[in-house]
Image: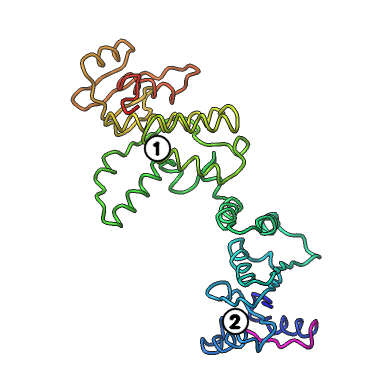
Amino acid sequence: VYYVSNRVKTIDEAEARVLEAAPEARVGVAHGKMSAKQVEDMMMKFQRGDIDVLVATTIIESGIDNPHTNTLIIEDSQRLGLAQLYQLKGRVGRGRTQAYAYFMFPGERPLTPEATERLTAINEFQELGSGMRVAMRDLEIRGAGSLMGAEQHGNLSSVGFDLFTQMLGQAVAEARGDAADDLAQSEVNINLPADFYLAEEYLPEVDRRVLVYRKLACAMELAEVDALQHECEESFGSLPQAACNLFDRTRIRIRAQRLGVSSVSIANGRIIFQGLKCSRELTLKLKEQRALVYPKTEKVAYPLRRDEAGAVAQALSVLELAGGDDDPEE
């Protein structure tokens, strides 16, 4: 039996409680303030079966493999994180014997909402291979879900999800020694006044939401975006406006990369396309729509109409006009 008490200063009291409950048990203690030799000796005794109950801190959460151990008891489990609880649970059930894990918490004090969610999650995900689902729930409980929603924080708020993902990919490529020039050249900065996210009410499962975000961030073909949108609509119904904007933003990014556009933004009531090379025919079409075309700087300033289409739809229509209505890769 593992008995986890994660406070070194009160671990002797925990040992006394175990001995009071089971006087016949052979009890040992292991914690981080013991020397490495002492901890090793105690673990060897436990592995040989010289100790029945090991009272320990979370020092046992990794690197311990005792197939004969089949019971885990954690006191004050509401103090531990979900990942810690899941890791500790993996210390038992490593052999052929049925294993049991008990997560104890004080009944006289109310649990915080976060602690309740953690304990509910550890109780819910009991089947094999639940690590990914536990990790996603842990992120959701700690607030990472809001990074993908309307409320964003930190670097993600500053640059947006698409650009953040591209920057991260570029950093990984540089760390691996790959050529990062192509990544930098294809980077598109999209700064349009609209919401770009999948609402929790539309797609409740955080792991599914993150999967959609990842697929959109990695999409390089318009057909991929169309197929993913169709899949979402088939499974969850019509897209809300913020989700439509999210998919159209990916279409803008793909078309802009093909046309060599480096940025799409709003300034002085116009949509500014930087790096858009215009043929004579395209220039005439844009000027008919009261756009300003600057051939030397490869800049187009398109008038932002105040209608129901919105800035995202208008920006996409301009890029469709510049690149043709058909996807050249299809």
Q: Is 284 contained in the magenta span? A: no
**Foreground: disc 1 or disc 2:** 1
**At 44% across and 23% down in the image, what residue appears?**
313
Question: In x, y percent, where is residue 285?
Answer: 29, 12
Query: Is 69 placed left or right of 217 in the picture?
Result: right
Among the 4 quarters of the image, the one containing residue 25: bottom right
Mark before the other along the chain sequence, 1 or 2? 2
Identified at 78% across, 63% down, the residue is 109
Is 166 placed left or right of 134 in the picture? left
* Residue drawn at (58%, 57%) of the image: 129
Residue reaching furthest front? Answer: 96
x then y, percent, for residue 121:
66, 55
**SS category of the residue bearing label 2:** loop
Q: Is residue 23 magenta?
A: yes
Q: Quadrant of the N terminus?
A: bottom right
* Residue type marked 2: His
Q: What's the mark number on residue 219? A: 1
Judge whether 53 appears above or below 195 on screen.
Answer: below
Q: Which residues are magenta?
A: 21-31
* Mark 1 and mark 2: Cα distance apart in space: 49 Å
Coordinates of residue 201 in the picture (x, y in percent): 63, 36
| Residue 188 rendering spot, x and y as whole percentages | 33, 36
Q: Nearer the viewer, residue 174 or 326?
A: 326
**Disc sitting over residue 31 in the figure:** 2
